[in-house]
Image (tube, grey):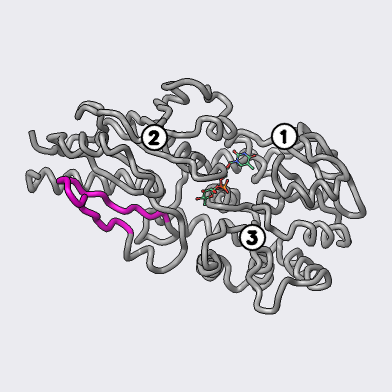
């Protein structure tokens, strides 16, 4: 039997958690969207159910197999196992080149109708991404080819992950002031704090959090900073004078800090929507901050040889490059300086300038959203590309 042009009915995603929450955060988002919007049966192979449970509390950590939100979830224990051709999905995605089990790859190669095989790469705004997106990589021994699929910010990339109906949900949430206040009130946010500048803080441990807190403390306008548990542990503990447990809070001068529990993924979106400014990191929260249409500061995942500095600059060059205060603040937040770490006077100035530009930035966020929407969403682009590969194969009978 030759590959055919009938729509694919099954898809498998293989995800290894390298660290933190972004690997499963992205794979889970993609799995749900493909299952719900593209009428395809999705199986998610994940090696770390505990991390998965943090962003999705329904997950049972000791189940070998379970269905969550319609997606079949398999605990991926190791690289062993013998797979039949009938175990193999029509489309197979490995996340960040995570090396799927050799037995599975062998079964993929044996299947008469070969699956479409993708390596889903990390997000970068660098120019080279366009040239590498959708490139084939034939297997060194087996008659099967893997294709690189790059998320990105232009129409020559795979675009960004975004489920349908997101905009409507966001607008509805943001237009309901009472609902938004009730959402934040569950974390202890008071009416007075509702009227202050509300910022969420999600960053890596090396972020200059103490300097930011001090700038906020000294600022004339009050700020309320909402910090999920486990973020910025040392500076937060120093500010609170106590452990940073959910529910802990303290006000000093113009700054109130509140510790939130680590919330499920959909609730994290609401947090981004409810705040005036979001500090985000990695890849998934970074993208969600863009869809929140609120000003944000990105703490990029650190890489060897400061490769991340290049990536950060590439993004800032695409995103509102004319707003100098955003670029200056973002570079310093990420330690990208030519003249050493800024002192507190410099931080104060950085914050004052950035704060003054927040309304201007806020106004521009929807233009950026619109521009990104024109590239299509990642899941739909991936399905389209898989469809085109299947058609070509059917025509060539390979
Ligand atoms: O957690 P991250 O730093 O994840 C990653 C990983 O380090 C990964 O190895 C790396 O490749 C990648 O970054 C670039 O940041 P990220 O990507 O923002 O993922 C966080 C996820 O956690 C995201 O899906 C949102 C979710 N989240 C919640 O569900 N609730 C919360 O309270 C918070 C703070 C986040």
Residue 393, image x, y percentages:
13, 46
Mark in the foreground, 1 or 3: 1
Question: Would you say 109 lies left or right of 279 here?
Answer: left
Between 181 and 46, which is closer to the camera in this rendering? Answer: 46
Task: Please report whichever mark, 3 or 2, sits nearer to the chain's N-terminal start.
Answer: 2
Q: Nearer the viewer, mark 3 or mark 2?
A: 2
Neighbor class of circle 3 (other Cα within 10 Å; few <14, some 14-19, many 20+) is: few
Label 2 crowd (10 A; few <14 / some 14-19 / many >=20): few
Q: Quadrant of the C terminus?
A: top left
Q: Which residue is mark 1?
A: 183
Q: Residue at x 9, y 46 (%)?
A: 395
CB under 8 Å between discs 1 and 3: no
- Estimate the spatial distance between the alpha carbons at disc 3 and disc 2, rounded to whole Å: 31 Å
Percent across and percent down for residue 23 are 49, 43
Estimate how packed mark 1 is, as few (under 14), some (14 to 19) or many (20 or more) residues with alpha carbons within 10 Å: some
Which image quarter is the N terminus in? top left
* Residue linked to disc 2: 37
Callout 3: SS:
helix
Asked whether disc 2 touches disc 1, contact meaning CB atoms under 8 Å apart, the reply is: no
Q: Which mark is residue 363?
A: 3
Query: Sequence-wise, which precedes: disc 1 or disc 3?
Result: 1
| CA gap, disc 1 and disc 3 | 24 Å
Q: Are marks 3 and 2 in contact (CB under 8 Å)?
A: no
State the SS at label 1: helix
Ranked by sequence position, the earlier of labels 2 and 1 is 2
- Quadrant of the rendered image holding ligand 1: top right
Mark 2 sits near ligand 1, with its Cβ under 8 Å away: no
Q: Which residues are magenta?
A: 133-151
- Residue at image location 40% in from the left, 52% down from the top: 121
């Amino acid at each position: 039997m030759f590959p055919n042009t009938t729509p694919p009915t099954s898809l498998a995603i293989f995800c290894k958690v390298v660290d933190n929450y972004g690997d499963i955060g992205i794979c889970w988002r993609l799995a749900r969207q493909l299952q719900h919007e593209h009428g395809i049966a999705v199986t998610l192979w994940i090696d770390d159910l505990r991390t998965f449970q943090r962003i999705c509390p329904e997950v049972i950590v000791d189940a070998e197999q379970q269905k969550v939100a319609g997606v079949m979830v398999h605990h991926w224990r190791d690289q062993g196992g013998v797979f039949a051709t009938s175990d193999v999905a029509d489309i197979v995605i490995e996340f960040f080149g995570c090396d799927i089990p050799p037995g599975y790859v062998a079964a993929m190669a044996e299947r008469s109708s070969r699956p479409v095989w993708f390596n889903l790469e990390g997000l970068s705004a660098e120019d080279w991404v366009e040239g590498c997106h959708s490139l084939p990589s034939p297997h060194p021994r087996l008659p099967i080819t893997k294709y690189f699929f790059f998320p990105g910010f232009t129409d020559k990339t795979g675009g960004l992950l975004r489920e349908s109906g997101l905009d409507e949900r966001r607008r509805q949430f943001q237009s309901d002031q009472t609902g938004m206040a009730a959402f934040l009130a569950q974390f202890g946010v008071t009416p007075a704090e509702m009227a202050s500048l509300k910022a969420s803080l999600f960053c890596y441990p090396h972020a200059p959090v103490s300097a930011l807190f001090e700038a906020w403390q000294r600022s004339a306008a009050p700020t309320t900073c909402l910090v999920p548990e486990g973020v910025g542990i040392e500076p937060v503990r120093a500010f609170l004078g106590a452990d940073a447990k959910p529910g802990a809070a303290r006000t000093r001068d113009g700054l109130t800090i509140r510790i939130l529990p680590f919330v499920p993924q959909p609730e994290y979106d609401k947090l981004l929507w409810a705040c005036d400014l979001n500090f985000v990191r990695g890849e998934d929260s970074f993208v969600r901050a863009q869809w929140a249409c609120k000003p944000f500061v990105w703490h990029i995942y650190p890489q060897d040889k400061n490769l991340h500095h290049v990536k950060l600059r590439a993004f800032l060059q695409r995103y509102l490059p004319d707003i100098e205060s955003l670029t200056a603040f973002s570079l310093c937040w990420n330690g990208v300086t030519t003249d050493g770490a800024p002192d507190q006077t410099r931080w104060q100035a950085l914050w004052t300038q950035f704060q003054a530009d927040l309304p201007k930035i806020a106004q521009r966020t929807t233009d950026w959203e619109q521009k990104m929407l024109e590239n299509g969403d990642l899941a739909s682009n991936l399905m389209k590309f898989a469809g085109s590969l299947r058609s070509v194969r059917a025509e060539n009978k390979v």
